[in-house]
């Protein structure tokens, strides 16, 4: 399909940066409109002179339904690991339990820690609520609630773990600043909810501030995610590069895409130290699948980022400018068609041919791109080696599944004090209910019981904790989870209970 | 201040629904602009004829700095519990560690499970990105990541627990539908991220669907939060009542306020079965404190909801309509002043007097309110009794702090198999890394090691788990947390690892 010799059928810019050996990549067409937009994209890549050797894999619905809970077959990993480049169509995850997100799995398995999502308004050629937007969201891609570690622990209570690591925070913050530096951007804004999650989001904010000091020429600021998301909605032109945690990044990416009217036009890169995955930001749109009306632009812009990534920046520039010219001329698929500005309503194939016919042209009003010598996506984000802290175990939060009132629990558990551990607090859904709780606090059947060492500065052993839990079990309690309490270099590594 | 006899100095509608006995409430002025907007609000309440007996408490910065980590003194709880009604000014939480959110503490201690935030555009009198908006966000207020249970567990990894309960989900979903029913609203939209968090957010969605079936006359739909937030930003007029989890509700409330241009005009109610708290949605704005320019409207609208709550709906109606008339006449504080539509730029005091002068009047263009006989906030949300499931302990996720490569860990831990428990999977940040991991997966020093019973259907005991952890400890491993694995009525209550 994409042959060894760069095509020069149309246009004149020879892709001099490409090698003669086609670059192997893995392509998955995906579900819904995936096959048609993937084929359209490959067609445009070929016409522009990209030198690629695609290998195809199956992903998505049919793979899930064959019984692979991650939507990808084990044999596909070898191809992904060998080529290290993945152009991925949108997929449909079947309804029903047990299926894991393919995107999350691929990102984490391949160490694709950075999701890079440019968000641009093409006003007045595409109807936008917000004009003059040109921001890039750098979303942490491996951590946060997306670890997908969930447990039902009692009749009433279900839990999901939010996990944040210091190297993960440093790597993504460093990526955001390096991206800003390499691409000549002026400001990086960090968004967290560290007024509530002081330890996890607090870490992200703190690491951001540290990394920022190494980039004195790039402005750095921080916003609480609720205000930040609202400002992305109302004043996106105020932002340049935004770096944030996985879940928040998911939400603000969609807001930014919607307010610029570019959901169908967004491409995204998922980048690691070794591998990278490129895709459209939109979904598989099964309602319009097979009708030949889908807009291939999102996938194309993902593929253009891929071209830059594999060293074919001139082809990328040529193709992106032809696409901008097509948009500017008003040749629009149904999703962005507007009587006010569009000149022609086209289907997938006609749009594809229109872009190909414009290879070698550049837009007159929209800003042309030039990737040559810039816009690399694999950036140097070496993080500081972890320095082991002096870690002292000072107690344990034991969670029990139990029905009753707090004071009864306090009394019964207090009777199990001993061997260096003493009950200091019981909370329910985080609120301290013993000692000195109030009856208005509504309690579930899931109680966090904090036992701490009697002597400050005197650590306890795992054995002391096991023996405590054994006493609880023998007294008829049902321990469902434990969180050990540690001091790191003399400072507590755990939060207080609300009201404590 | 607010005396026993309803004031009739201005206007003529006697507050016939009020009793002659003033209703005791607790008032806290808070920080920053808090004192000036609280006084302005109380002045308007008095002038409108509210029959209230306020008792004052201190909250916020000065209380934090006196050493109360929740920003409230223990003596204040008695007043709150006795009066059950709290009108709260905005507060400033001091920088630095150890402080817990006052709002979260009050909400949870008093069981204020529902945050009710109406969001209205006052176009064209207040500059709005979005017109014709009249939606209400019903935010779950006690659960989610706001439990504030955080633990640092290794040199690299920090954790926050997201806790969701079935009764909590049912109560808030029921509240949303009851609110819709009582207030004549047509649709309730649920927002979750259940494509990723299938167990926790999945529960919320599932309970929503169940409750919806009891309200056949109210439309019900569900959106993934990323798209949902984007649609609140771009098409808020499409929404009526929105119900969602705590964190998502926080984010979309701010988006809705920003796109309607009403951050300074938003009031919010926090409602439980027994108590309720009313406040402005904005913060303490220390930069303009003491200058006499702050807009008291947010606090006033919170107080108007409070009047309805305490049975003074006629006073509430009268005061709200006078406020609408003031806005419509273009008498605006600096935050909403616009040369296009405003007629007079006023300070806090002048705005307050303008509202008072208009008591008895109603807006001509904006829709007047009428609370009489409706808009109650305490709603019947009795939830189904929890039916205990048959619960079988089938294994444990032991998390260890360890440095090395997955296969070594797999081999060393596998050697500790026995006594009915066998290592079946190791994951790092949720991704399966043993067996059959790939080297590209980036690992932290925090490993989730899943041990399960050898014989399907044969439960294990707490003792078996403790003895496993003892073997781990004796072999030199550092167990930092455990999550017991349960089947509930024969179905697994835990998720698979990514790639498993």
Image (spheres, coloured by chain):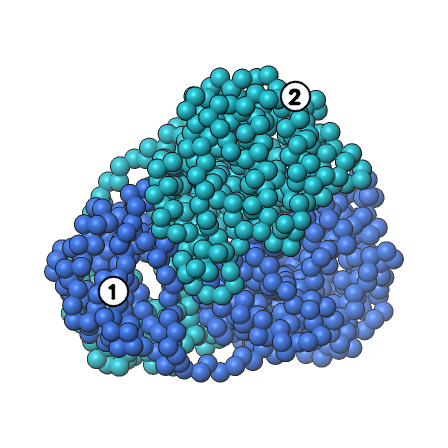
Chain colours: A cyan, B blue
Q: Position of residue A103 (x, y in %)?
A: 46, 49
Other-residue count near label 1 (Cα within 10 Å), few / some / many at <14 / 14–19 / ≥20: many
Question: What residue lies at 78% left-to-right and 34% top-to-bottom?
Answer: A343
Q: Are marks 2 and 1 on the same chain?
A: no
Q: Which residue is mark 2?
A: A361
Q: Position of residue B309 (x, y in %)?
A: 66, 72
Left or right relative to A432: residue B56 = right
Question: What residue lies at 66% left-to-right and 64% top-to-bottom?
Answer: B241
Left or right relative to B80: residue B481 = left
Helix, strand or loop under label 2: loop
Q: Position of residue B282 (x, y in %)?
A: 61, 52
The image quadrant of residue A389 is top left
Front one among B211 and A234: B211
Q: Which residue is mark 1?
A: B451
Q: CA distance from mark 2 to mark 1?
A: 61 Å
The image quadrant of residue A134 is top right
């Amino acid at each position: 399909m994409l042959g060894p010799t760069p095509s020069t059928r149309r246009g004149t810019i020879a892709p001099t940066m490409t090698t003669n050996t086609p670059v192997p990549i893995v392509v998955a067409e995906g579900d819904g409109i995936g096959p048609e937009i993937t084929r359209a994209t490959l067609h445009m890549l070929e016409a522009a002179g990209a030198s690629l050797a695609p290998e195809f894999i199956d992903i998505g619905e049919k793979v899930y339904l064959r019984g692979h809970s991650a939507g990808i077959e084990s044999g596909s990993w070898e191809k992904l690991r060998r080529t290290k480049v993945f152009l991925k169509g949108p997929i449909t995850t079947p309804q029903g339990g047990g299926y894991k997100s393919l995107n999350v799995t691929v990102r984490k398995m391949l160490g694709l820690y950075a999701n890079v999502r440019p968000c641009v308004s093409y006003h007045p050629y595409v109807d936008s609520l917000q004009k003059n937007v040109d921001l890039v969201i750098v979303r942490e891609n491996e951590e946060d609630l997306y670890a997908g570690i969930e447990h039902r622990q009692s009749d009433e209570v279900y839990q999901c773990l939010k996990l944040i690591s210091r190297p993960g925070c440093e790597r993504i913050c460093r990526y955001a600043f390096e991206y800003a530096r390499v691409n000549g951007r002026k400001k990086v804004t960090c968004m967290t909810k560290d007024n509530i999650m002081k330890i996890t989001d607090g870490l992200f904010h703190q690491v951001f501030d540290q990394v920022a000091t190494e980039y004195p020429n790039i402005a750095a600021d921080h916003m609480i995610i609720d205000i930040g998301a609202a400002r992305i909605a109302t004043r996106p032109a105020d932002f340049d590069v935004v770096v944030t945690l996985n879940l928040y990044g998911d939400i603000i990416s969609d807001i930014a895409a919607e307010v610029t009217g570019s959901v169908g036009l967004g491409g995204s890169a998922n980048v690691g130290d070794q591998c990278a995955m490129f895709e459209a930001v939109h979904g598989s749109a099964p309602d319009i699948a097979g009708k030949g009306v889908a807009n291939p632009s999102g996938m194309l812009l993902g593929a253009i980022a891929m071209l830059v990534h594999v060293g074919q920046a001139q082809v990328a520039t040529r193709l992106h400018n032809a696409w901008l010219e097509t948009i500017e001329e008003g040749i629009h698929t149904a999703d962005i068609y507007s009587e006010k500005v569009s000149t022609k309503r086209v289907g997938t194939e006609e749009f594809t041919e229109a872009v190909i016919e414009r290879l070698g042209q550049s837009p007159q009003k929209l800003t042309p791109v030039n990737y040559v010598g810039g816009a690399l996506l694999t950036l140097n984000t070496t993080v500081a080696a972890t320095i082991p802290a002096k870690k002292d175990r000072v107690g344990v939060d034991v969670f029990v599944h139990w029905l009753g009132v707090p004071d009864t629990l306090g009394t019964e558990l207090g009777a199990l004090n001993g061997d260096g551990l003493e009950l200091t607090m019981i909370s329910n859904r985080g609120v301290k209910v013993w000692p000195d709780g109030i009856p208005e606090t509504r309690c579930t059947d899931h109680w966090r019981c904090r036992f701490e060492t009697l002597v400050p500065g005197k650590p306890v052993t795992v054995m002391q904790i096991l023996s405590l839990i054994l006493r609880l079990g023998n007294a008829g309690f049902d321990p469902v989870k434990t969180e050990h309490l540690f001091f790191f270099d003399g400072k507590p590594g755990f939060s207080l209970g609300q009201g404590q």
